[in-house]
Amino acid sequence: MSSTVGGGAAPATGAAERLGIVPGMVIQELGWDNDVDDELRVSIEDTIDADMVDGDYGNVVDTVILWWRRDDGDLVDGLVDALTDLVGGGAIWLLTPKVGRPQSVDAADIAEAAPIAGLSQTTTAAVSAEWQASRLVAPKTPA
């Protein structure tokens, strides 16, 4: 599923809003490397009017941005680690290279890893020319 006609590039402007990111949120970024989309990162930081925090933050965060590539290791372990600081009801946006790009992650791998990590996949969106995002959340438990 793509948020753009024909699966083309989604403009970085407004990408943060499409990810449900609003001013004042604390966003943790994990898996950063030289290949990430800097325009998307700037869009997120402009929206929250702050820098994203890293894995050493040590406090709760509203959303986790997890950049993930096929060779990054075990996806279940990466997702479990991403849950460490996430506030209840928060989301993990798993950003992976689009299909056909180097290091792309098979959708079946995400669908398999998410429930093992205790997560459900709710949305997939194209967020830049090279990256797509999958929204993962912990299932709601009865009160």
Image (cartoon, helix red, strand yellow):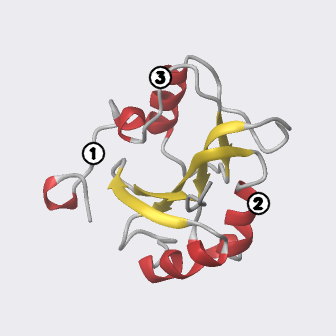
Q: CA distance from mark 1 to mark 2?
A: 28 Å
Given contact means CB atoms under 8 Å apart, are the residues at marks 3 and 2 in contact? no
Q: Nearer the viewer, residue 94 or 60?
A: 60
> Which callout, 1 or 2, points at the residue further toward the start of the chain?
1
> Disc 3 or disc 1, which is closer to the eye?
3
Which amino acid, by three-letter code, is at mark 2? Asp
Q: Which residue position is annotated with label 2? A: 81
Q: Secondary structure at mark 2?
A: helix
**Is 50 positioned to the left or the right of 96 in the image?**
right
Q: Position of residue 28 (x, y in %)?
A: 67, 40
Residue 98 x, y percent position in the rendering: 38, 65
**Residue identifier under label 1:** 10
**Earlier residue among tags 3 and 2:** 3
Residues at discs 1 and 2 in contact (Cβ within 8 Å):
no
User: Quarter of the image containing the N terminus?
Assistant: bottom left
Distance of label 3 from label 1 (alpha carbons) = 17 Å
